[in-house]
Image: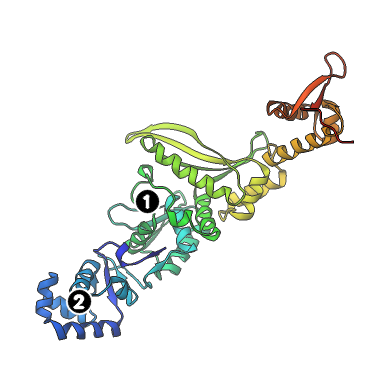
């Protein structure tokens, strides 16, 4: 997907390459006077002369009128745009059309995370305590837009905040970023990211987890997981769930299984009922895939993830499936008691019994007796088929 002049707001100002601008106005002058041109497109003749001489730019709305008057296509002109200018005078040297890239996908992920595009001014801001992430966002904006921040501050709580011009914000909104308060957002992941390659999806997910992800790991608490949570107004829960389901599907493409979407908590604010929802990555195989494919650039979370992987995870979906398969293969030759199966598969008796009951629920094994009254259960495959 590309973003061209057609996708940008009409009040943005563009400046044309010198050679192209001069050739364009020579053609115009042969067909119509500059005074008549000014009357037709609704600007002063002085402004027409300033545009012709390169002192001023043209609003996209005015450029569209020129295209209609002289049978030009907008996409023919946009490749000759040298600069975008905002109403407040901010400038960005950027080639049009803009190719939606991995870097833009990452910036868009931050827009859904700790970044935001203001509703009225359309300025893009990013706040984070991790200096490394802030530097990364600045580098991304510089690479795509050739522009730096218009302001940088450090708050009393240690948070760094950088703000970029409305040109950056307008392009990100055109690419699918939410504008205004994200608690009101009804947006899903943009189609160009959903349908994009792995590099595009990885960049978007990486930014999201850096901003809103977390790692649960504790010496005293059994559960361990990688989590991703967001807050939205309760009235938008249907759209919220769709957004989380999309993220769940994208993670699955990297071999990362998740639980959810689930509601972590609900609370009230003066502007309404809010809910915190998210997805969890709990099994060791998926956490390992997450570390390999997505990971954290945020330093403290990266360390927590490394620690979690070194210690291992008690609950592991992939490990359970392997245990079940081992049990079924063991029972092919002859029936075994719970204790015997536990020894052959390498599990405790308690864990082996849980696994066998799961197989029993699915109709794959049956109980055929006990080793003695009130002692270990003897299990067999349903149907009793054996190999010799």
Q: Is residue 296 left or right of residue 63?
A: right
Q: Is residue 335 left or right of residue 168?
A: right
Residue 126 drawn at (x, y percent): 42, 55
Residue visible at 26% across and 81% down?
A: 21
- Say if 363 sits above or below 71 in the image: above
In the image shown, does 205 or 1 lie closer to the viewer?
A: 1
- Residue 249 at x, y = what percent? 53, 46
Mark 1 burial class by Cα count in 10 Å: few <14, some 14-19, many 20+:
many
Q: Secondary structure at mark 2?
A: loop
**In the image: residue 151, left or right of residue 215:** left
* Observer-nearest of 360 and 104: 360
Quadrant assignment for the N terminus = bottom left
Residue in view at x 49 percent, y 58 percent: 196
Tell me the CA gap for discs 1 and 2.
Answer: 36 Å
**Residue 270 drawn above or below residue 103:** above
Q: Which mark is residue 178?
A: 1
Q: From the image, tell me which residue sits under label 2.
A: 70
272 to 251, vertically: above or below: above
In the rendered view, how is the structure colored?
rainbow
The residue at the point 28 percent across, 71 percent down is: 74
Task: Pick whichever, 145 or 67, lies toward us.
Answer: 67
Q: Does the residue at mark 1 contact the one at mark 2 (Cβ under 8 Å)?
A: no
Residue 336 drawn at (x, y percent) = 85, 27
Where is the C terminus found, in terms of image quarters? top right
Which quadrant would residue 355 be assigned to in this image? Answer: top right
Tell me which numbered mark, 1 or 2, is placed earlier along the sequence: 2
């Amino acid at each position: 997907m590309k973003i061209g002049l057609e996708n940008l707001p009409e009040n943005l100002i563009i400046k044309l390459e010198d050679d192209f601008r001069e050739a364009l106005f020579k053609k115009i002058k042969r067909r119509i006077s500059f005074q008549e041109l000014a009357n037709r497109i609704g600007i002063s003749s002085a402004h027409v002369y300033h545009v012709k001489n390169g002192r001023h730019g043209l609003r996209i709305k005015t450029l569209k009128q020129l295209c209609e008057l002289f049978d030009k296509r907008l996409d023919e002109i946009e490749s000759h745009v040298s600069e975008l200018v905002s109403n407040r005078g901010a400038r960005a040297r950027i080639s049009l059309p803009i190719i939606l890239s991995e870097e833009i996908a990452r910036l868009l992920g931050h827009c859904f995370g700790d970044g935001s595009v203001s509703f009225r001014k359309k300025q893009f801001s990013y706040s984070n305590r991790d200096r490394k992430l802030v530097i990364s966002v600045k580098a991304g904006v510089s690479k795509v837009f050739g522009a730096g921040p218009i302001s940088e501050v450090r708050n009393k709580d240690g948070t760094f905040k950088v703000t970029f011009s409305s040109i950056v914000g307008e392009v990100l909104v055109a690419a699918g970023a939410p504008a205004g308060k994200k608690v009101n957002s009804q947006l899903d992941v943009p189609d160009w990211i959903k349908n994009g390659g792995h590099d595009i999806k990885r960049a978007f997910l990486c930014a999201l987890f850096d901003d809103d992800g977390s790692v649960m790991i504790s010496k005293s608490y059994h559960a361990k997981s990688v989590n991703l949570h967001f807050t939205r107004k309760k009235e938008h829960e249907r759209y919220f769930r769709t957004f989380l389901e999309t993220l769940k599907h994208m993670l699955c493409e990297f071999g990362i299984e998740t639980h959810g979407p689930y509601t972590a908590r609900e609370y009230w604010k003066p502007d309404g009922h809010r809910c915190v929802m998210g997805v969890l990555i709990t099994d060791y195989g998926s956490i390992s895939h997450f570390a390999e494919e997505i990971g954290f650039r945020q330093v403290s979370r990266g360390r927590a993830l490394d620690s979690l992987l070194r210690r291992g995870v008690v609950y592991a979906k992939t490990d359970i499936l392997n245990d079940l398969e081992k049990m079924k293969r063991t029972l092919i030759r002859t029936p075994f008691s719970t204790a015997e199966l536990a020894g052959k598969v390498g599990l405790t008796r308690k864990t082996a019994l849980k696994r066998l009951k799961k197989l029993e629920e699915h109709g794959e094994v049956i109980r055929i007796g006990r080793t003695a009254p009130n002692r270990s259960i003897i299990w067999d495959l349903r149907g009793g088929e054996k190999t010799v």
